[in-house]
Image (tube, rainbow, N blue to C red):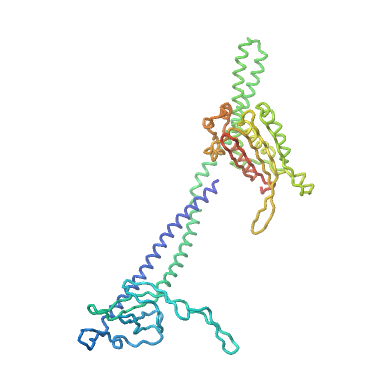
Amino acid sequence: MFQATRRRLALWYTSVTAVLLLLFASGVYLYVRSTLIERIDDTLNHVVEVVERSLVIEPVKSDNGQFRVNVEASFRDNTDTGEDDRIDLEWFSPTGELLWSTFSQPLNIPLHFNRTGETVKVVRKENMGDKATRRQGDKEEFTFPTPPLWLRQVTERVQVGRQVLGYLRVSHPWFEVTKPSRQLIFDLALGIGLMVFSVAASGWFLSGKAMEPVHESYQRLKQFTADASHELRSPITLIQTNVQVALTDLELAEVDNSIRSHYRQQLKVVERLTQRLGKLVNDLLFLARQDSGISKEIFSPCPVDALLMEVVEEQQLLATEKNITFSLDLIDPPACETDPELLDNWFTVVGNWDQLVRLFTNLIGNALQYTPAGGCVNVELARMEAINRVSGLRYNSAYLLFKVKDTGIGIPPEALPRLFDRFYRVDPARTHTAKSIATQSATGSGLGLAIAQAIVESHQGQIQVESTQGIGTTVTVTLPVTFDF
């Protein structure tokens, strides 16, 4: 229980820290990326301003006051090849015709006015087809398509008055944003991974430290419960013995019959209450020993079919008194099973006989107690085969499936999650039916199902309860045939 709580605390520490780090890293990434883009846009706009100031604008030899840009004088000749990380210029005529460019080949992308900056994808001609081959002599060489080019561009319209002289487009390689962004993502991912691992280790250590006082208090409480239960057993036994002796002496004493009847009734009440208190103490002692791990029961092969027959025989008297149809069904092995040793031990599990008797007595007794007269209680036992996979290996495992189904008053849906809590009892007022049965249920201590769960868990099994109010309840127990101690 404490290890599961410790794991949950460490997982919560790690999850919360991971979410906070992820939000922080996302903010840092978006801030750095936007800063890089803003810096490139500022650079492009600055280049546009510089180029505009260096343009040579000449009047056209006409009387209409027209001007033109002297491209040869405004732009220096550019070589065919250039560096990828430089800023490239393009000059277009007022009609959108490319007149001058620093690119080795035209970009072939539409021209539109944009002063705020935009990111464009340029698909080069070499990238338009699939993989091509070229043969040289006896060798065949492969040439692969050129990857697309990403650019950040600013397009400025140059005009004098209302006359448009042309368009200036300035381009900057986009990898100066993507390259540091990818490096930043890698660094942030690495940092987050290391931080999450450190927080997970620290959370595991700190949760263990935080759980130590709780664990010590819980151990002291369990020890106190075990000691108190053990110490209470002796005086309760003495009280029961003295009551029985008093009842015997009362029968022998020469007193009036009315007085004898009065004292006998009082002593019977004391005996009944003492027996109930003794049962409660025994239940508490059993649970305390199971919790503390000091219980040293011996596990050995137990034929559950024979065990159930004994329990059913013991409970048959109560079923007869209440006129309840009580049956036991043992599902036979399949006809294809021919192993005589397996058939002889078909319903045998490794467990503790006394604990299993207590388990099935509690479950069957509850079914009979909460089933009204004329109802039905059916007990079923079957052996099931399961196929499990561990580390890629396939193996068969067997378990016994025990079911006890009744047609009793049922359990409200809101009470099902708390059925196995200690001292928890369903509110009889919520059933609204079978008031005599509800009155009987009030005499319980609320430890029966908690004890049943403890026994099932000690045998590494599972227990489930399904119920519909007013229709009935089905309790299912699965017990592995063999398990690791």
For residue 327, what is the image quadrant?
top right
Image side of residue 233 versus residue 125, left or right? right
Examine the rendered structure and indicate whether residue 289 appears above or below residue 36.
Answer: above
Measured as percent of width and height from the top left, residue 347 is found at 72, 43
| Image location of residue 17, percent across then percent down | 45, 56
x and y, in percent, of residue 245 in the image:
65, 20
Which residue occupies the foreground of this view, 386 or 153? 153
* Left or right position of 28 against 208: left
Of residue 184 and residue 465, the one placed in the foreground of this image is 465
Q: How many marks?
A: 0
Please name the residue shown 59% across and 87% down the image.
139
28 shown above or below 12: below
420 sits left or right of 342 in the view: left
Asked whether 419 or 299 is in front, the reply is 419
Residue 312 picture quarter: top right
The residue lying toward the viewer, choosing from 22 and 252, is: 22
Residue at (69, 50) in percent of width and height = 397
Q: Residue furthest bottom?
A: 137
Residue 45: where, in percent of width, then height? 30, 75
Residue under the point 66% across and 53% down: 388
**Vertical relation: 252 (above or below) 366:** above
Say if 472 sits above or below 61 in the image.
above
